[in-house]
Amino acid sequence: MNRRASFGLRAGLVALALAGCAGTPPEEDPVQIRLKDLDTRLARIERVVANQSLLDLSNQGEAMRNELRAMHNDIDQLSNSLEAGRKQQRDLYADLDRRMKALESRGAAGAGGAAGTGEGPGVSGAAGDSPLPGADDKAAYQAAFASLKDGQYDRAIAAFQKFLVTFAGSPLADNAQYWLGEAYYVNKSYPEAQSAFQRVVDKYPQSRKRPDALLKIGYCQYETKQWASAKATLSQVTAQFSDTPAGHLAQQRLDKMATEQH
C-alpha cells in the first residue's frame, strides 16, 4: 500500500470516530449522567431537610400542646380551690349572719354587760371618761339594754331615746344610738331603724359601731326594696371595711341581691 492510500485510510477512521462521538445520545453521556445523579442527590437532601424542619415543628407543637394541657389542669385545680374557699367563706358569713340575727331577736343577749362596763365590742369608751355621773348613764344604758335583751322592743326604744336626751354627752351615746336602731330593726320598723343608724354614721363618725350602722342601713334599704340605694350602701361597706365582719356580711348580701337579680 502506498503512502497516499495509507493516509486516506487513517483519515476515514478519524472521521468515523468523530462521527461516533457526535452521535452519542445524551442519556448515555457520562457528563449528563453525572449531572443527573447530582440533581437526584440534591433533591433527596432537600427533602430530608424539609422533612426534618417539619418534624421539628411537629415536636414543638406537641410540646406546646402538652404545656397548655398542664396549664389547663393547674387552672382547673386553682378554680376548684378558689370555689371551695368561697363556699367556706359563704358558709362562715351565713353562720355569722344567723348568729347576728339570733342576737338581734334576743336583743343581743350578753352584750349589755360588756357595754355597761365599757369593755368589749360595740363600746366606744369607758363610762369614767364622761363628765356626767358615770353610775347614772351606765345604769340607764343597762336598763335600756335589758329591755332590748328581754324582747321588750317598744320599751327599749323609749329607754334609749330618753338616754340619748338625758345623757347626750355620755361615751355610751353612740352605742345607745346604734342599739336604738337595732330595736327598731328587730321590730321591723325599717324606716325608723334606717334613720337611727344614719345618725350613728353622721353624728359619731369615729365610733366603732359605724361599720355595723352602715351595714344595717343597707339592710334597711334592702327590706324596703330600695335596691339601688342598698347596693350603693353595701358596696361602700365592702370598700371601706372589707376585712371586717360588717364588710363580709355586706358582700354576702350583695351576692344575694345578684342572685335575686336586684
Image (tube, grey):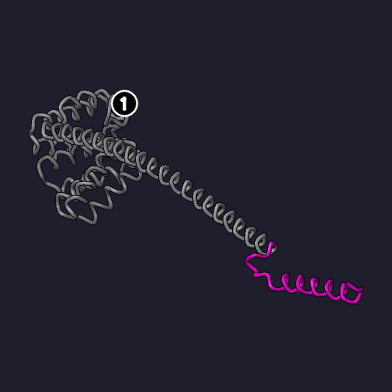
Q: Is residue 7 magenta?
A: yes
Who's the residue at 42% across and 42% down the image? 67
Position of residue 13 measured from the top left corner of the image (x, y, whole percent): 79, 71
Question: Residue placed farthest to the front in the image?
Answer: 1
Image quadrant in which the N terminus is located:
bottom right
Viewed as shown, does residue 249 lie left or right of 3? left
| Side of 250 where 25 appears, left or right | right
- Residue drawn 87% across the image and 75% down it: 5
The 10 Å Cα crowd at callout 1, few under 14, some 14 to 19, many 20 or more, is some
Residue 79 occupies quadrant: top left
20 vs 199, nearest the viewer:
20
The residue most toward the right is 3
Residue located beneath label 1 in the image:
126
Q: Quadrant of the C terminus?
A: bottom left
Residue at the spot 15% in from the left edge and 35% down from the top edge: 101
Give the magenta-colored segment's residue range. 1-30
Q: Is residue 174 visible?
A: no
Residue 168 at x, y = what percent?
Answer: 26, 38
Q: Does residue 59 appear to the left or right of 246 in the view shown?
A: right
| Residue 25 shows in this picture | yes
In the visual, does 145 lie left or right of 36? left
Secondary structure beneath dot 1 equals: loop
Question: Which residue type does callout 1 highlight?
Answer: Ala
Nearer-the-camera pick, 102 or 121: 102
Q: Would you place residue 228 above or below residue 62 in this image?
A: below
Position of residue 141 relative to residue 206, above or below, is above
Residue name at image x 25 percent, y 47 percent: 198
Secondary structure of the magenta portion, mostly?
helix
